[in-house]
Structures are given as structure tokens and as C-alpha cells.
Amino acid sequence: MTKEKLLAIMEIARLSREDLAAVSGRTTRQTYAWTNGEAPVPRPLALVLYALEDNAITFEWLAEAIKRDQQ
């Protein structure tokens, strides 16, 4: 996933870097590296973002899945 594609999906889905950190289990600092093109987006995260873009999952579903995982 390119940084441009990442930023486009983030904008469409209204995701912040903090949201990406929560979804990926990484730090906000790492998300800056992805959005700046300094590090590749991890494949599992890229697949989740593509699913969001394709409306295969919703942000609400994703948020609930994250909550369940943290319990």
C-alpha cells in the first residue's frame, strides 16, 4: 500500500493516526512513518483498510472488534 493510498483511505474513512495505532496495535509514532512513506504499512492492516474502503466492513464493526479484543 502506498502512502498516498493510505492517506486517501484515512480521509474517506475519517481515520486518524491514533485510530490506525489502535487498529494495528502499534504506536502513533509508527503511523507517522507509514503516512510519511518512511516504513511500509503492515499487510494485515492494509487488508483491513482495503476492506473498509470496499465497504466489506464498517468502522463501527472494526471499533467493536477492537473493544472485544481488548477485554
Image (cartoon, rainbow, N blue to C red):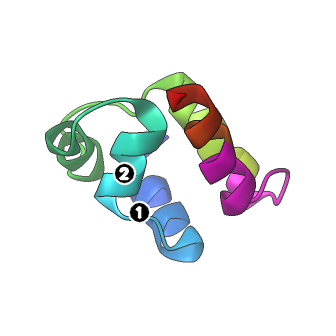
Q: Which corner quadrant of the image does residue 19 belong to? A: bottom left
Q: Residue at x 50, y 74 (%)?
A: 14
SS assignment at label 2 = helix
Image location of residue 50, percent across then percent down: 68, 47
Main secondary structure of the magenta stretch: helix
Give the amino acid type for the residue marked by disc 2 in the picture: Lys
Q: Is residue 22 left or right of residue 66?
A: left
- Callout 2: few (<14), some (14-19), or many (20+) C-alpha neighbours within 10 Å? some
The disc at residue 7 is 1
Q: Is residue 50 magenta?
A: no
Q: Residue at x 21, y 45 (%)?
A: 28
Q: Is residue 53 magenta?
A: yes
Near-viewer residue (22 or 44): 22
SS assignment at label 1 = helix
Q: CA distance from mark 2 to mark 1?
A: 6 Å
- Callout 1: few (<14), some (14-19), or many (20+) C-alpha neighbours within 10 Å? some
The disc at residue 33 is none
Near-viewer residue (14 or 69): 69
Q: Magenta residues, as a range? A: 52-64
Q: Is residue 24 left or right of residue 61?
A: left
Image location of residue 37, percent across then percent down: 24, 44
Q: Is residue 50 left or right of residue 38?
A: right
Image location of residue 40, percent across then percent down: 34, 30
Image location of residue 34, percent across then percent down: 28, 42
The disc at residue 3 is 2
